[in-house]
Image (spheres, rainbow, N blue to C red):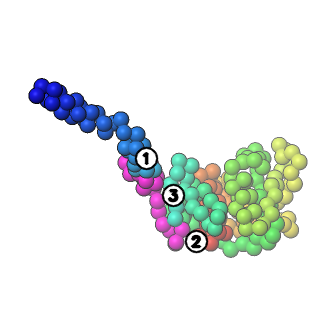
Amino acid sequence: MKEAFLGKSLQRKKEQVRWYKNKKFLISLVGIFIILVMVGSYLNVGGDNEKRVNYGGYNFIKTDKGWMTYIGNSAFLFSFMPKDLEEINMPQFNLGNKIYILFDPEERNEASYEVQRLSYMLDYKGIKAFPACIKEEKCGNIPILNCDSQNSIIYLKSGNNKAYIDKNCLVFEGDKEYQSKLIDRFSYGLLGVM
């Protein structure tokens, strides 16, 4: 009788230990955990570091670098949402298939973020963009142009916050933050978002 009791006791102990020694069960448990983590991160469960907004049929995702959206198969990054730029009037300007991005070499250079952003957007639309300076000093080997030139020009200029046309220039005038807004507003128009 004592042996029968001990046999049943050992069998119960085996059954109690068996669930965590079962490889299939553990693999399934780990798999379910990984799937839950992946689904949770996709749906952003447990955090609000990512925000999604729809504007005009375009889905924007807030990232640590700005607002990202896809147009076709290409990702575009913006500092501002289109809704925040609706008040900015962007004048109509004939871009042609070649344009110069004009700047003061005291304030920026051809590798400046604003110049590169504009170049990328224009290039996406098949418009060749080239840097140009308003003066020779600190300009290097870049063309010197002004708004009287026969070329189409986007001029990044310090001053009052506005966008306007001056002869052959589409002028983005303002401090760096406002110029960033103007570049985003122009890019949204160029891409057909606004």
**Mark 3 or 1 closer to N-term?**
1
**Mark 1 or 2 closer to N-term?**
1
Q: Quadrant of residue 166?
A: bottom right
Q: Which residues are magenta?
A: 39-58
Measured Cα–Cα span from mark 1 to mark 2: 44 Å
* Residue marked by disc 3: 61
x, y (%) of residue 175?
Answer: 62, 52
Residue at horizontal 40%, vertical 40%? 23
Judging from the image, what secondary structure is the residue with disc 3 in? strand
x, y (%) of residue 65?
Answer: 56, 49
Judging from the image, what secondary structure is the residue with disc 2 in? loop
- Regarding residue 173, the answer to whether it shows in the image is yes
* Residue marked by disc 2: 194
Question: On the rendered structure, is 4 left or right of 151?
Answer: left
Q: Residues within 10 Å of mark 3 (few under 14, many from 20)?
A: some
Judging from the image, what secondary structure is the residue with disc 1 in? helix
Find out whether the residues at labels 2 and 3 contact each other: C-beta distance under 8 Å. no
Q: Residues within 10 Å of mark 1 (few under 14, many from 20)?
A: few
Tell me the tag on residue 31.
1
- Total residue callouts: 3
Q: Is residue 21 above or below residue 144?
A: above
- Nearer the observer: mark 2 or 3; the answer is 3
Residue type, numbered disc 3: Ile
- Nearer the observer: mark 3 or 1; the answer is 1
Residue at horizontal 21%, vertical 34%? 12
